[in-house]
Image (cartoon, rainbow, N blue to C red):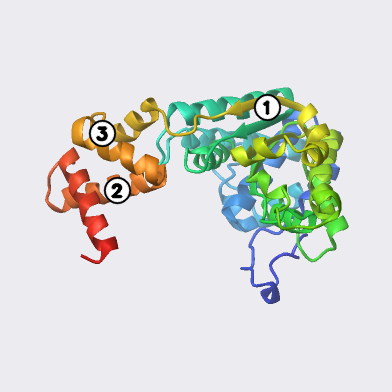
Amino acid sequence: MDTDDTSPRRGHKHRKYKIDRTDIAQWTKSLGEEQSALVFWLDDYARTQDLDLEELGKRLKKPDGKGTYSRDSVYQFLTGRRTSDQLDNMLAAIFDLRKIETERSKITRIGFVETDITRRIFQVCDSTRNFGKMGLVIGNTHVGKTTAFVEYTVRNNHGATTYVRMPAGGSKGAFLRALAPRVGVGLNHNDQSIANKIMAVFDERQLLIVDEFHQCLPRPTRKERNGVAPSVYHTVEWLRELHDETGLAIIYGVTPVFDAAMKNDFFSGIFKQTLQRTLITARLPDSPTKKSLAAFAKHFGLEPATGEALDLQTLVLREDSLGRWISILEGASKVASRHSAPLAWDHVIQSHAALVRLENGD
């Protein structure tokens, strides 16, 4: 059992679910692909929701439909100690639970707005996973890239998709320690042990989304030989090795700064072998499309902006960001709600004006 990344001295909350996924990866090798996928799904489901084994057992229905499984039964199953017939019954229970949870995951979460940009990112993620390759999504900050990645992970979670952000600086050690808890690997090991354990839990059925991948680019002030930090090189090479050894599909999310850096021979040399494995390179629009903005307006019960409202929308997006615009819409919606009135563009204009006055100290 894996209890190593929840020590109080590390400042982490104790996890209730403590099964080591590397053990699961070992004993499931003898199972068929569908059976193994069910076991990994259950492991990730329990890990994501941080269920103890008793809680997890209560969600698994026995074949008679009347009883549920005990803590001990679940432990015996997850550690590969069940006989063939017992295994079949538990797998059937997992199949039923996965069906229920899959239906729930299809419901769009409150606050998420699906746009043409997010749909495109979803398609890139699907294609990259299906072909077991690498993908590159290039887009400015605040065009919805990260929001789409996170939503895709929610909809395709439980053993299928893992999302992680590249830490600032992009060192291999920092990246491994950001990724490890997301795949059930503890942190009280050295970097090489953590890397080996992570390598053992991924396979060709899964997708890893590495957002902010451009953090691997050394800063201009760095003076390492040829302008390249060895730690950055090691991170990029390890991810390539992870893909090659496990068949894991990987999506990299970057800003246009990555495109610009690839014009530098030193940088492009680091990423050459990674980019050669890229199936899809998707370049997103520099700013939200008209369709995206109409989708956000519709989400708040508004028609697409026109006149003064359109001028305001254009101004905010040009001088600030989509995030700022959505915050203004949310603020206007709250004002309208307090007055028990349907949201109108006048509320949005007033909300923005009030925000500007507040920022100016008027």
Looking at this view, is 308 or 204 the one in front?
308
Location of mark 1 (residue): 128
Element at badge 1?
A: helix
Give the number of the disc on residue 328: 2
Determine the CA span between mark 1 and mark 2: 35 Å
Residue 68 drawn at (x, y percent): 59, 47
Spot occupied by residue 340 in the image (x, y as percentages of width and height): 12, 48
Provide residue 29's location: percent of width, then percent of height: 85, 37
Looking at the rendered structure, the kind of residue marked 1 is Thr
* Vertical arrangement, residue 50 with respect to residue 103, above or below: below
Going from N to C along the chain, the mark reached first, 3 or 1, is 1
Q: Secondary structure at mark 2?
A: helix
Front residue of this view, candidates 323 and 362 = 362
Quick check: marks 2 and 3 in contact, CB under 8 Å? no
Q: Which mark is residue 36?
A: none
Give the image location of residue 77, x and y in percent: 75, 47
Residue located 62% across and 50% down the image: 46
> Quick check: 315 left or right of 252?
left
Local secondary structure at mark 3: helix
Choose between 293 and 111: the one closer to the eye: 293
Left/right placement of residue 121 relative to residue 263 reads left
- Foreground disc of the pair 1, 2: 2
Distance CA(mark 3)–CA(mark 1):
37 Å
